[in-house]
Amino acid sequence: MPKKTAQPAEYVLEVEDLVVEYGRRRILDGISMNVRAGEIMVIMGGSGSGKSTLLRHLLGLEVPAGGTVRMLGRDVSEMTNTEMDDLRQHVGVSFQSGALFTSMSVGENVALPLRERQNLDDNTIRIMTRLKLELVSLAGFENLMPSQLSGGMIKRAAFARAIVMDPKLVFFDEPSAGLDPVVSAELDELIIKLRDALGTTIIVVTHELESAFRIADRITVLDHGRVLVTDTVDAVRNCQDQRVQDLLNRTPREMKIDADDYLRRLTEEEPEYVD
Amino acid sequence: MSKCEVQDQAGFALVVVEGEVDMSWSNDLRQAILGPLNAGRPCMVDLSAVAYIDSSGIAALVEGYQKAKGAGTFFGLVAVSDAVRSVLELARLDQVFPMYENLEQAEASLS
Amino acid sequence: MAAQTLSRMVSRVSRDMLRGVSDFGYLIALLGESFYWPVFGPRRKQPVRIEAVFTQMMQIGVEAIPILAVLTMAVGIMLAIQLVNTLELFGVESQVVLAVAKAMTREFGALMTAILLAGRSGSALAARIGSMVVSQEIEALRVMGIDPVRYLVVPAVIAFAIMTPALVVLADAMGIIGGGLFSTGPLNMTMETYIRTSIEVLTVGDVMQGLSKGLVFGILIALVGCSAGFSVRGGAEGVGRATTRAVVLSLTYVIIVDMMFTWFMNV
């Protein structure tokens, strides 16, 4: 089934020792991971695991305290804004909320990257936009405004916008969160189809186990800002690590209490917060 | 390298495409296809040597086919490579375009 | 206890001042980018779209015409009433024509336009950008490789820079007409002579003073609105706060700049 996954040497995304700190708190603590060309990598973790923060850094939206992110062979921190904007023509992102432009119709949303960054004929743009809308089963919804769409339709429209430039690398933030199981399965199907037909590398950030196991080639499990394991679906399923198993079996976290620390947290005066 | 070339055949124009079709030059392909069609000539596109085609290239093919239908002339794809076929299948356009194994077959369908 | 409160107050004031300075720095940076993108944008394959500028010009300018006309006419009438009453004391009420014309073109035309635009369009700009921040639309632009400043700020700044002086001309005219509406009676003058006299007493310098103020005010309001929008944190409430901040800050800047302008051009 996986047609185009066997290119082991070629990494589309390389993360090395990524460290992120907000004030005194360390959110990401030495994250390292690689994503191969044509692979579907699922980054999994509960809330507070740091997966959203990781995504923001992978997208180059924030500057890390340490470590490097290399995307499509380029070190993100060493690029100029112009280079970064050009590289982003090959990267698509579908946000959790969709982040559709509320002042534009669905069609205009999907067409925006083409209009703003490419010099294409209007006919070409129209056909390309509709091709993507067909792909996500939104044909005929082109002229609706985002406020008129259901949650699932917003996700699919955002999906269409993310892939309208035929990117080499696509990020999906929580593709199935808040969707009914049928729509969510359809989106998963679409992610796999896209990879199989175009060889697109896909990175999915999610906390949904079923979806992760369905689509992933490899899974990276994140917990408290650290990578617990990066491996194939089967290997992660059989992983002996207790915390991985807790996550897979949805056991609540064991809260170990350090008496002194707990007391201090309860009684400490608020530090004057300066942002 | 990547390019497209219009060859005059008996009764139709053949656009031979090579390499990777992407947004940087798909407009050339579009012009090459629309040229003969605007002049009312049937047009075939040879896709045997295409290693990759993005959706702007597909859009050029779609526009060509639509133009041909409107003008009552003929448009078809010849010797579609695997790379192109999988993209066409993803968009379910394999059920739309007239596709031929080779040039002889295409010529036969014309007459 | 008192010392603690005091030190907390000092630290708050210094933090606010620091924030003010960094906000001002951001305004300057935005201003710089507003000159950068029209020139270098095309080379970076990110041109500033004329259509976007036109859309903004419609919203800022054309749609503001009726309300601005009413406001400035009212100001003209008020000026005329006060001046007729005051100048009567010296027996020079005929000078009302001159006084209204100069006051409107040099000062009130630009000021009224700025007040209206700050309340109407600057706040709208802040709200629009602010809600785009909240709904991740700004980040969506960034990850598409579309610079938000180029796409959102520059068209607005250009539109403000063009439309504000244009509106000032309208404001001047309506103010003078408003002055005429009242003072033609006490002065025993026809509207026609009133307006002709007004035009005669005005110099190019009077009008230019108002227009150049309008240009500066317009750019200021646009920059403050945008920067307030980008600074939004924390949901819908944040958007509301940013909108208020945009109006208060831009009016503050406008009046201070107006005072400096007037000082250097007339003293």
Image: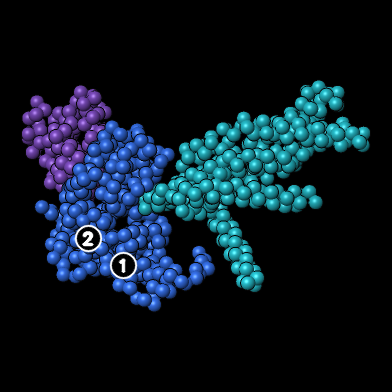
Q: CA distance from mark 2 to mark 1?
A: 16 Å
Q: Is residue A179 visible?
A: yes
| Chain displayed in cyan | C
Q: Position of residue A116 (x, y in %)?
A: 39, 44
Q: Amino acid at mark 1?
A: His
Tell me if residue B34 comes above or below residue A48 in the rendering.
Answer: above
Report crowding for label 1: few under 14, some 14 to 19, many 20 or more residues within 10 A (C-alpha): some
Q: Colour of chain A?
A: blue
Left or right of A81, for residue C118: right
Q: Which mark is residue B66?
A: none
Same-chain status of marks 2 and 1? yes
Relative to residue A227, is residue C171 depicted above or below? above
Disc nearest the viewer among 2 and 1 = 2
Q: Nearer the viewer, residue C66 or A81?
A: C66
Secondary structure, mark 2, is loop
Colour in which chain B is shown? purple
Q: Is residue C184 above or below residue A236?
A: above
Image point (38%, 38%), residue name: A147
Of mark 2 and mark 1, the one earlier in the sequence is: 1
Task: Tell me which residue sits at (57%, 32%) in the image.
Answer: C62
- Report the residue marked by disc 2: A250
Name the element at disc 1: loop
To which residue does mark 1 refer? A224
Mark 2 is on which residue type?
Answer: Arg
Can the viewer see residue A167 in this picture?
no
Residue A260 placed where, x, y %?
39, 77
Dividing the picture into quadrants, the one containing residue C108 is top right
Residue visible at 80% across and 33% down in the picture: C80
Q: Nearer the viewer, residue A8 or B63?
A: A8
Residue C220: x and y in percent read: 60, 49
Residue A220 location, x and y as percent? 23, 63
- Graded by Cα atoms within 10 Å as few (under 14), some (14 to 19) or many (20 or more), the crowding at tag 2 reads few
